Image (cartoon, rainbow, N blue to C red):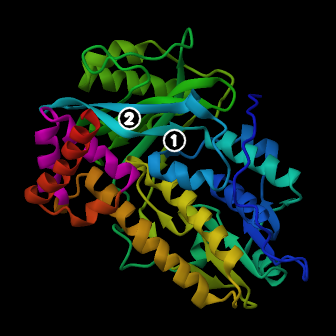
């Protein structure tokens, strides 16, 4: 097991002054968002119990990673409020090389550093810290009856079980949900080079540890990027987004293990992106991890943030349970980290009642500041028709103007400006801010 030194986060001010017992909070679901919430709230001074239907060992070693969970620049700062960065450069990258079949190829240098860490590793590390600091881990299956019992014993129960199961307790918010069906069929597999070296993509980029985004307008997109695997250490992840009805979708559905997933990606690159096919051919699966692959589809959904159990217990949705986005723009990981950090800070300072009004207000602030921009940025990267002119303007400029490429990928870190992008003139103004920023740095 890879060991990483701990860097303690700053959110450690007790939520009580010693005159009364800490308020009890339950967190149901021990993935990365649940583990992060448990740790952040424990450090904020609350009495926290983390519930999971799987043991720690099962969570780490017997389930697949639920996505790449890349943290882009801004969200890394929020995540550091939960726990400081213990992974450093092992999973970091700061450039994507982009190519569009029938269109431009360009480098997109970030003005931040992104980091992709196996969520099973990150979650397990945070559970370990949570337990070290006095938190409780309860291994049990939580159905509706058990959820009712848990909620009756705690002032609030946070539900972090992802997109299915207990998420159904929270009604869909149709006004905020961008789609009613999945937009891509997904396939992912974690891989490594034979000698553990970085992958270089001649003709695309000469940067070390650069990510690669390949786009075919008919079939979909493939992301290749650096990744820190829970056991193998520095490695690479392939993440494909197939358009429904495409040949690629049919191929993705045929994957049945890591080896078949990698073979499908190899064939896809030979068919659609032959310039980098030799580099994909040279990658190998991680034999020690039979769960290093995943396939499926996500319906982007926003839910009402607060619900009650049959007996009146207070339930609050966090992470993908609250806002599930298509993974193409990597916004799910951002939203989970940002929501958890803000929630811990708010509850530590809150002196009033914990009720529907409070948690709805906190979620509405999260939605306006981060959720809505992230949902819209995802629609942009999906090529939603309402962003057709915006996407065309970005890609038309990026091959000749590095500032345009940087501006486009900055929306992954700080998606807020996407709300003001509706046409070519908006893109022009946005790109100019990055040109001016670059000129200032050069001076």
17 part of magenta stretch: no
Instruction: Tell me the SS state at disc 2.
Output: strand
Q: Quadrant of the N terminus?
A: top right
Q: Which residue is drawn at the image coordinates 16% and 41% (left, top)?
A: 395
> Measured from the top left, where is residue 76 in percent x and y?
53, 48
**Occupied quadrant, residue 156:** bottom right
> Measured from the top left, where is residue 253 in percent x and y?
43, 40
* Magenta-drawn stretch, dominant element (helix, strand or loop): helix
Residue of label 1: 68
From the viewer's perspective, is 146 left or right of 90?
right
Task: Answer above or below: position of 343 versus 186.
Answer: below
Disc on res. 223: 2
Residue span colored magenta:
387-414
Q: Which residue is drawn at the image coordinates 50% and 60% (left, top)?
A: 335
Q: Residues within 10 Å of mark 2 (few under 14, many from 20)?
A: some
Q: Which residue is drawn at the image coordinates 12% and 47% (left, top)?
A: 392
């Amino acid at each position: 097991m890879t060991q990483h030194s701990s860097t303690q986060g700053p959110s450690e001010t007790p939520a009580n002054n010693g005159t009364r017992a800490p308020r009890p909070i339950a967190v149901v679901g021990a993935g990365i968002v649940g583990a992060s919430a448990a740790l952040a709230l424990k450090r904020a001074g609350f009495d926290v119990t983390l519930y999971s239907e799987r043991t720690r060992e099962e969570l780490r070693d017997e389930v697949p990673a639920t996505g790449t969970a890349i943290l882009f620049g801004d969200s890394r700062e929020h995540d550091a409020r939960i726990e400081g960065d213990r992974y450093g450069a092992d999973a970091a990258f700061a450039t994507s090389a982009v190519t569009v079949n029938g269109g431009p190829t360009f480098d997109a240098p970030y003005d931040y550093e992104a980091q992709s860490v196996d969520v099973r590793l990150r979650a397990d590390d945070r559970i370990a810290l949570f337990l070290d600091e006095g938190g409780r881990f309860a291994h049990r299956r939580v159905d509706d009856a058990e959820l009712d019992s848990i909620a009756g014993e705690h002032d609030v129960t946070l539900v972090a079980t992802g997109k299915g199961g207990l998420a159904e307790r929270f009604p869909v918010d149709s006004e905020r949900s961008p789609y009613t069906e999945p937009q891509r069929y997904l396939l992912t597999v974690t891989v490594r080079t034979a000698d553990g070296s970085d992958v270089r993509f001649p003709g695309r980029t000469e940067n070390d540890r650069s990510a690669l985004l390949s786009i075919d307008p008919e079939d979909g997109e493939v992301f290749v990027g650096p990744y820190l695997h829970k056991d193998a250490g520095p490695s690479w992840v392939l993440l494909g987004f197939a358009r429904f009805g495409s040949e690629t979708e049919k191929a993705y559905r045929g994957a049945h293990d890591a080896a078949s997933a990698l073979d499908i990606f190899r064939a896809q690159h030979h068919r659609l992106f032959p310039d980098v096919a030799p580099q994909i051919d040279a990658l190998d699966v991680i034999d020690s991890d039979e769960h290093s692959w995943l396939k499926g589809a996500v319906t982007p959904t926003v839910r009402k943030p607060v619900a009650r159990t049959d007996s009146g217990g207070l339930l609050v949705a966090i992470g993908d349970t609250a806002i599930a986005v298509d993974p193409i723009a990597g916004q799910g990981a951002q939203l989970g980290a940002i929501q958890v950090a803000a929630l811990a800070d708010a509850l530590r300072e809150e002196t009033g009642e914990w009720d529907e009004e409070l948690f709805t207000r906190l979620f509405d602030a999260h939605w306006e500041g981060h959720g809505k921009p992230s949902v819209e940025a995802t629609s942009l990267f999906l090529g939603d028709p309402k962003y057709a002119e915006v996407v065309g303007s970005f890609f038309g400029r990026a091959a000749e103007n590095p500032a345009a490429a940087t501006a486009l990928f900055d929306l992954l870190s700080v998606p807020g400006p996407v709300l003001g992008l509706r046409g070519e003139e908006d893109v022009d103004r946005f790109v100019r801010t990055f040109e001016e920023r670059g000129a200032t740095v050069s001076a």
